[in-house]
Image (cartoon, grey):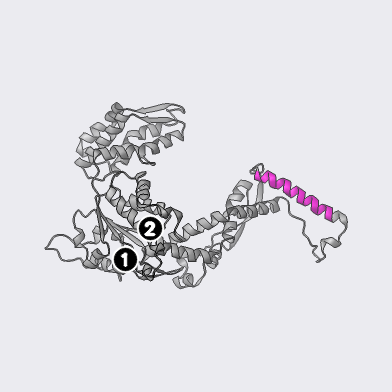
């Protein structure tokens, strides 16, 4: 079943993307439609539902304009497994390097992790109770219901029964103290599973394929080691182990495969790097064309074998992206072009966009730096004119040197504030207030922006 977040309308999806990404409305609209179409497909009752496949998207735009961020945020909105791969890292079948099917395997691994985390959250309360019992057993061992000779405690004299009641009462008192954190510093001895010396890479693929997830987990965590730790640390170490014991990994595998298959998003970056040259005299590069032909069956729909089982790629949404400065989308082989029917051109960022990027997104750079200084109890504030000047300088440097889009803001902000970050807390004490003014920005960055030879060092 599709997650609740994917029930958002296209307008609501665009609004959610607007919280983090400035501009690029055409790209946002197209990915919003693609996401909503997944929910629409699941509502189709006729047999045609299986034939409705996603319209894969090709994003064309310079670096730093938001291509990757749009895809990543879309996956978060949909609670969908997401992987980003670089097309230039793949090699044609028969050559040394990553094969294209690895992107699908990575997607399944991501889905396994997401489903497992969700299942662990469901059993977290029960697992915490079991951890409490383990800690209490270490503090106050329970009186056994039966003697070593096998006799039932009911046949024992009354004092033994009284001892049992007293033991239970003592355990309950300590349980309350444990829950209130009163015993967190007390040290106890526990058994903790430690990784086996056999690494995953040393296990043959056939062995992994045949082993169930539970057996594989047990294989890698079968060694138990006694450790003496504080109770707070014991609870942290034991909780994941107890939660894992309560999870049915076969169900995790089944749900994860379905999640990857029907909601997965694969972002293929730098696809222009495997396209042929736009120069007419240049013949096709056999290796690059070979990678394209290897990508083709994955994108158009095929079965990929993973260690968790077969996954079909027909309904995975593929979003490809590239700057296409040297080559053009038409340089891709026609069959691959046909598998990315939606083409979106992302516009270059202007000075006003830079200013909005610095202030409006929920994770804006100015807010990030304010949070870093706040961790040291130092107040950081930006005047409106200062933000406008930072945006203007970053835009000017992009024009003079290499245009790396919004990423230029990271380096400009770093040069502006690094001295302050170094001086906190040695020279700048807590509760001090740092005001970033236009004069301060010009003092630290203007000379750098005007001299091209120096600005080249900012990357």
The total of numbered circles placed on residues is 2
Near mark 1 (Cα within 10 A), the count class, few <14, some 14-19 or many ≥20, is: many
Question: How far apart are the alpha carbons under marks 1 and 2?
Answer: 14 Å
User: Is label 1 or label 2 in front?
Assistant: 1
Q: Residue at x 35, y 61 (%)?
A: 317
Quarter where residue 248 is shown? bottom right
Find out whether residue 174 is within the magenta segment: yes
- Which residue does the numbered mark 2 point to in the structure image? 83
Q: Main secondary structure of the magenta part?
A: helix
**Horizontal placement of 283 versus 131: left or right?**
left
Where in the figure is residue 378, as x and y percent of width and height? 44, 30
Between 60 and 113, which is closer to the camera in this rendering?
Answer: 60
Q: Is residue 366 visible?
A: yes
Quarter where residue 181 is shown? top right
**Horizontal placement of 29 versus 186: left or right?**
left
The residues colored magenta run: 161-179
- Which residue does the numbered mark 1 point to in the structure image? 299
Sequence order check, earlier mark of 1 and 2:
2
**Horizontal placement of 420 versus 193: left or right?**
left
Could you tell me which secondary element the residue under label 2 belongs to? strand
Q: Where, quadrant-wise, is the C terminus in this rendering?
A: top left
């Amino acid at each position: 079943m599709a997650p609740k977040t994917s029930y958002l309308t296209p307008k609501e999806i665009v609004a959610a993307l607007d919280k983090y990404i400035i501009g690029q409305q055409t790209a946002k609209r197209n990915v919003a439609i693609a996401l909503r179409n997944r929910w629409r497909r699941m509502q189709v009752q006729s047999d045609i539902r299986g034939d409705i496949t996603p319209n894969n998207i090709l994003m064309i735009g310079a670096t730093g304009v938001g291509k990757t961020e749009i895809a990543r945020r879309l996956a978060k909105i949909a609670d969908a497994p997401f992987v980003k791969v670089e097309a230039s890292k793949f090699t044609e079948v028969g050559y040394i390097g990553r094969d294209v099917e690895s992107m699908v395997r990575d997607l399944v691994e991501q889905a396994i992790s997401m489903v497992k985390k969700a299942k662990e959250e469901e059993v977290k309360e029960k697992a915490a109770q079991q951890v409490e019992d383990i800690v209490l057993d270490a503090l106050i061992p329970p009186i056994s219901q039966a003697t070593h000779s096998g006799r039932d405690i009911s046949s024992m004299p009354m004092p033994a029964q009284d001892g049992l009641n007293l033991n239970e009462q003592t355990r309950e008192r300590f349980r309350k103290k444990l829950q209130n954190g009163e015993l967190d510093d007390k040290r106890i001895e526990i058994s903790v599973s430690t990784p086996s010396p056999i690494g995953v890479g040393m296990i043959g693929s056939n062995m992994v394929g045949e082993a169930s997830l539970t057996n594989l987990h047990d294989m890698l965590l079968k060694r138990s080691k006694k450790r003496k730790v504080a109770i707070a640390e014991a609870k942290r170490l034991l909780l994941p182990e107890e939660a894992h014991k309560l999870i049915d990994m076969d169900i995790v595998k089944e749900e994860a495969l379905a999640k990857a298959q029907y909601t997965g998003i694969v972002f293929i970056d730098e696809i222009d790097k495997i396209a042929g040259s736009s120069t007419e005299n240049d013949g096709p590069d056999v290796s690059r064309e070979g990678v394209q032909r290897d990508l083709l069956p994955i994108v158009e729909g095929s079965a990929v074998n993973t260690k968790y089982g077969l996954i079909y790629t027909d309904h995975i949404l593929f979003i490809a992206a590239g700057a296409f400065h040297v080559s053009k989308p038409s340089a891709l082989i026609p069959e691959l072009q046909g598998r990315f029917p939606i083409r979106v051109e992302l516009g270059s960022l202007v000075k006003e966009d830079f200013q909005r990027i610095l202030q409006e997104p929920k994770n804006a750079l100015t807010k990030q730096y304010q949070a870093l200084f706040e961790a040291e109890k130092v107040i950081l504030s930006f005047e409106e004119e200062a933000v406008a000047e930072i945006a203007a300088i970053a835009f000017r440097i992009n024009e003079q040197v290499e245009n790396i889009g919004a990423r230029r803001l990271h380096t400009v902000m770093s040069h502006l504030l690094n001295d302050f970050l170094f001086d906190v807390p040695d020279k700048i004490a807590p509760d001090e207030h740092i005001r970033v003014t236009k004069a301060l920005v010009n003092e630290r960055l203007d000379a750098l922006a005007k001299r091209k030879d120096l600005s080249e060092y900012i990357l």
